[in-house]
């Protein structure tokens, strides 16, 4: 009986609470989860791991599938405003721009060399390859496709424009040069007027794409003078198109085919002028 009474006393103390209190943490955990989601930790946004100067920080921007890259490349051929919202959402990438620019460099050198072979064959001249064009293509394309958007982003940050990230700037410029790849292939056609038309089309398509997607960012600045940067962008893009035409798409044969090239070129029995 004594043992029973002890147990009964213990039960009585438990019933009275004995200073113990049971508390549910489900509500707190739910609130914590909502707060974390509000801060982006539990959302679908890409996680920013590592600092800005570490490899892990940029690794996330190379995690993209082939279909997405192709869609973003094709999307530049039919230029529309809000490219970032329509194609680069939820996250821009560096994988596509890097391989777009690298493929362009490869195409410029390979197909210009192929065109040199065709010109030499039609002109009864020995084939001469200029491997210096490869280093020129690397410097020109990477400087324009990677270096210039980085400098533009720095300038806009200095002017108080914070709505545009560095990754978005590089993505827009990198994907925007995709149109030059098919042009490099088609410019093996030994007709000067056709090559001018192709270069002109590529210049208009890529130029409109860049202006349509960069000007809204420039217009968001408090200073209206920032909008004048679009003139620099247009002039620099025109300089790129002219440089590609002169360096990689200008070659002449002894027997002129089609309309004479506006830049000229030696014809007749003289040795043709080749930029290779």
Image (cartoon, rainbow, N blue to C red):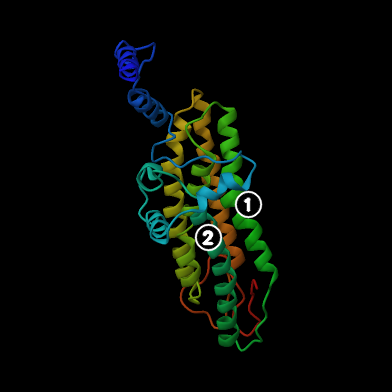
Badge count: 2
Asked which quadrant contains residue 215, the reply is top left
Label of residue 143 in the image: 1
- Front-most of 186 and 245? 186
Position in image of residue 46 (x %, y %): 45, 42
- Residue at disc 1, secondary structure: helix
- Res. 254 visible in picture: no
- Residue at disc 2, secondary structure: helix
66 to 87, vertically: above or below: below
Q: Quadrant of the C terminus?
A: bottom right
Which callout, 1 or 2, points to the residue nearer the camera? 2
Label of residue 99 in the image: 2
Position in image of residue 108 (x %, y %): 56, 67
Q: Residue furthest right?
A: 132
Residue beneath the point at 42% across and 61% down: 66
- For marks 1 and 2 on the same chain, the one whose residue lies earlier in the sequence: 2
- Front-most of 40 and 273? 40
Position in image of residue 159 (x %, y %): 56, 27
Q: Quadrant of the N terminus?
A: top left
Residue beneath the point at 42% across and 48% down: 209
Residue beneath the point at 34% across and 27% down: 30
- Front-most of 240 and 12? 12
Callout 1–callout 2 Cβ contact below 8 Å? no
Residue beneath the point at 51% across and 48% down: 60
Label of residue 158 in the image: none
Circle 1: is it few (<14), some (14-19), or many (20+) Cα within 10 Å?
few
Rounded to the nearest whole Å, what is the CA distance between mark 1 and mark 2? 15 Å
- Front-most of 81 and 157? 157
- Res. 116 visible in picture: yes
Side of 92 relative to 240 (left or right): left
């Amino acid at each position: 009986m004594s043992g029973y009474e002890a147990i009964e006393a213990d039960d009585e103390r438990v019933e009275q609470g004995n200073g113990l209190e049971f508390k549910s943490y489900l509500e707190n955990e739910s609130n914590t989860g909502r707060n974390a989601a509000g801060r982006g930790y539990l959302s679908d946004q890409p996680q920013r791991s590592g600092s800005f100067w570490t490899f892990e920080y940029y690794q996330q921007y190379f995690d993209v599938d082939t279909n997405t890259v192709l869609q973003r490349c094709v999307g530049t051929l039919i230029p529309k405003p809000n490219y970032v919202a329509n194609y680069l959402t939820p996250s821009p990438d560096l994988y596509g721009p890097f391989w777009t620019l690298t493929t362009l460099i490869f195409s410029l050198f390979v197909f210009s060399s192929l065109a040199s072979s065709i010109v030499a064959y039609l002109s009864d001249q020995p084939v001469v390859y200029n491997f210096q064009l490869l280093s020129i293509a690397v410097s020109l394309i990477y400087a324009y496709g990677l270096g210039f958007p980085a400098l533009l982003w720095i300038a806009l940050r200095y002017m108080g424009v914070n709505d545009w990230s560095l990754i978005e700037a590089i993505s827009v410029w990198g994907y925007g040069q995709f149109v030059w790849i098919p042009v490099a292939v088609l410019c093996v056609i030994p007709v000067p007027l056709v090559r001018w038309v192709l270069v002109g089309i590529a210049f208009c398509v890529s130029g409109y794409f860049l202006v349509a997607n960069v000007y809204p960012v420039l217009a968001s600045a408090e200073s209206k003078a920032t909008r004048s940067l679009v003139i620099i962008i247009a002039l620099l893009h025109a300089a790129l198109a002219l440089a590609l035409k002169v360096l990689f798409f200008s070659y002449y044969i002894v027997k002129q085919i089609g309309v004479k090239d506006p830049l000229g070129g030696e014809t007749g029995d003289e040795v043709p002028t080749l930029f290779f």
